[in-house]
Amino acid sequence: MFRRYAAVAALLTFVMLMVRAAPTPPPSSATVGAMGRGPTIVLVHGLGSDAQHWLPVARDLARDHRVVLVELPGHGEAPLIRPFTLEQATLALDRAIAEQSRDPVVLVGHSVGGLVAAAEALRAPSRVKALVLVESALAPQMTKLEADSLLAMFDRDWVGTLHMVYASFGRDSAQGEALWAEASQVERVNMRAWIPVALSTDLTDEAAALKMPVLAVVSRRTWEADETWAHAAKALGLARIPRLKVVRVDNCGHFMMLDQPRALSDAIRRFSAASDTAYALR
């Protein structure tokens, strides 16, 4: 009898190990659509946002680029695989890039979308010839105690806390209300899975391995007028990026692509052109 139980236990252990070792199925492609002709630029929206926020910028860039719009997992038609991790979001973005371009792309991410874009550039540098981070931080912007407190607030009062957060992102109260209404359309379970990733991920040290050109485009709310860039870059987790340039855009809130689409598209276009030249000379 002991031998029989031992054999069953061994079989169960083997099965459990195989399940744990089995690779996570690759997520579905996050591509929403593409427009234009020319070098490929991939645009990634932020948490609680959607690809439509990029349309004013995308239409302008599409005059001389092929522009690909993607969705983050758990947004729109892009599924969220559980248990959710930053790696799952990165794999979804990687698949979208692989499907849309044989050549390296200029990868642009807004806010948490920039965090995912940076993770993709670290994971698959051969796919990314240049990286643009729009209002993005690669380091946590609050302490663990503050993050735990915010998560507890979400769990106690989801609607009220979501409203508080997204209303603060607007350039004014009207835009803040619109951003909150749009974020509210994302399924709560999906948003809740994302929030700990957004609050706690720290790529500060890994960012030193970003060898491609990187552009940070920030507003004055992110890089304040009386603050040195060295201080702001350290706070944002960007200080160790070797080939970093920064552009500050005035008169906008966190959603720069809505407030200053032409200024943002011009910055991306100039950076893309410079990156094409640098890439050709490699």
Image (cartoon, rainbow, N blue to C red):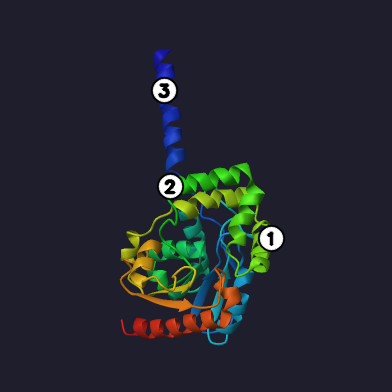
Quarter of the rendering containing residue 141: bottom left
As drawn, 155 above or below 5: below
Q: Examine the rendering and report whether any part of residue 63 can be seen.
A: yes
Q: Helix, strand or loop at disc 3? A: helix
Q: Which secondary structure lies at badge 2?
A: helix
Where does the image place residue 95, in percent across and percent down from the top left? 50, 63
**Viewer-side residue, 237 vs 78:** 237
What is the crowding at mark 3: few (fewer than 14 residues within 10 Å), some, or many (at least 20)?
few
Badge nearest the viewer, 3 or 1: 1
Work out whether residue 257 or residue 21 is closer to the camera in this orientation and state it: 257
* Mark 2: amino acid: Lys
Q: Are marks 1 and 2 in contact (CB under 8 Å)?
A: no
- Rate crowding at label 1 as few (under 14), some (14 to 19) or many (20 or more) other CA atoms within 10 Å: some
Q: Are marks 3 and 2 in contact (CB under 8 Å)?
A: no
**In this view, 201 is above or below 172:** above
Residue labelled with disc 1: 181
Label 2 Cα neighbours within 10 Å, binned few <14 / some 14-19 / many ≥20: few
Q: CA distance from mark 3 to mark 1?
A: 57 Å
The image quadrant that residue 182 belongs to is bottom right
Which part of the image, by quadrant, shows the N terminus? Answer: top left
Q: Residue furthest front?
A: 226
Q: Earlier in the sequence, mark 3 or mark 2?
A: 3
Query: If you read the primary sequence from the N terminus, does the residue marked by circle 1 or circle 2 appear first?
Result: 2
Q: Amino acid at mark 3?
A: Ala
State the mark number for residue 144: 2
Q: Which residue is mark 3?
A: 7
Q: Is residue 232 left or right of residue 69?
A: left
Q: Earlier in the sequence, mark 3 or mark 1?
A: 3
Q: CA distance from mark 3 to mark 2?
A: 46 Å
Q: Amino acid at mark 1?
A: Ala
- Determine the image quadrant of residue 131: bottom left
